[in-house]
């Protein structure tokens, strides 16, 4: 269920869990399962290892301004340093990661991917911890990642994203 509110009201409020703001509507985010939280921690920990060597910053569940009427909250995002400081992200992330929840619909996930691509995000990942699948969204298409890892293109270099190893960590818990 979505609720119509003003942008000022959205930006000045805090929600638990945080909500997204899409065209004047306050939109619920599906989060909260233990598997989702574990996957978010594992992916965040892996990306955080590259902070210094790749000049990046990793954030979990922070609002990203897509345009004047849209704010999304990806599960994880990576920014290149330096970036603008503030209460929400105004810079274009290098990477966004959406970790699906059993309640997520395909259309909602795809909508976010299209929005991130329109913003200019280079690497849009979707991880399905329930089925141990990872996808990369590129050129308006969601591609299943095969093998054990995928290279992610940053500004000056690449970053290895070992999704199979991350799913194996989930299996160990």
Image (cartoon, rainbow, N blue to C red):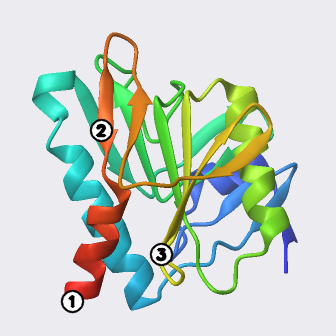
Q: Quadrant of the N terminus?
A: bottom right
Residue placed furthest toward the front: 147
Q: Position of residue 64 (x, y in %)?
A: 57, 41
- The number of callouts visible is 3
Q: Is 167 placed left or right of 142 in the picture?
A: left
**Taking 41 as reference, is 131 above or below it?**
below
Label 3 crowd (10 A; few <14 / some 14-19 / many >=20)? some
State the SS at label 1. loop
For image coordinates 29% across by 65% down, the residue present is 166
Question: Which residue does the numbered mark 1 point to in the structure image?
Answer: 173
Q: Tell me if label 3 and label 1 are in contact, CB under 8 Å.
A: no
Which residue matches tag 3?
A: 132
Q: Residue at x 31, y 78 (%)?
A: 38
Going 51% across and 84% down the picture, which residue do you hit? 130
Above or below — where is 104 with respect to 20? below
Q: Quadrant of the C terminus?
A: bottom left
Q: Is residue 70 left or right of residue 132?
A: right
Q: Which mark is residue 160?
A: 2
Q: Quadrant of residue 171?
A: bottom left
Tell me the quarter of the picture where residue 161 sits.
top left
Task: Say left or right for 148 vs 96.
Answer: left
Say which of 161 and 54 sits in front.
161
Which marked residue is nearer to the observer: mark 2 or mark 1? 2
Q: Earlier in the sequence, mark 3 or mark 2?
A: 3
Q: Residues within 10 Å of mark 1 (few under 14, many from 20)?
A: few
Instruction: Measure the alpha-carbon separation of dots 3 and 2.
Output: 18 Å
User: In the image, residue 10 lies at what x, y percent?
Assistant: 67, 55
Q: Is residue 97 above or below residue 141?
A: below
Q: Residue drawn 62% across and 78% down?
A: 30
């Amino acid at each position: 269920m979505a609720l119509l509110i003003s942008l000022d009201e959205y930006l000045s409020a805090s929600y638990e869990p945080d909500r997204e703001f899409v065209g004047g509507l306050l939109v619920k985010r599906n989060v909260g399962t233990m598997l989702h939280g574990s996957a978010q921690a594992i992916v965040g920990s892996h990306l955080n290892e590259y902070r210094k060597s790749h000049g990046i910053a990793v954030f979990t569940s922070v609002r990203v301004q897509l345009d004047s009427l849209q704010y999304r909250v990806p599960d994880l995002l990576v920014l290149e340093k330096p970036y603008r400081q503030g209460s929400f992200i105004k810079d274009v992330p290098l990477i966004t990661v959406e970790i699906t929840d059993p309640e997520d619909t395909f259309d909602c996930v795809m909508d976010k991917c299209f929005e991130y691509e329109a913003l200019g995000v280079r690497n849009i990942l979707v991880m399905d911890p329930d089925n141990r699948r990872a996808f990369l969204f590129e050129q308006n298409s969601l591609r299943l990642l095969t093998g054990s890892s995928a290279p992610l293109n940053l500004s000056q270099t690449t970053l290895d994203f070992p999704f199979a190893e991350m799913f194996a960590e989930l299996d160990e818990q």
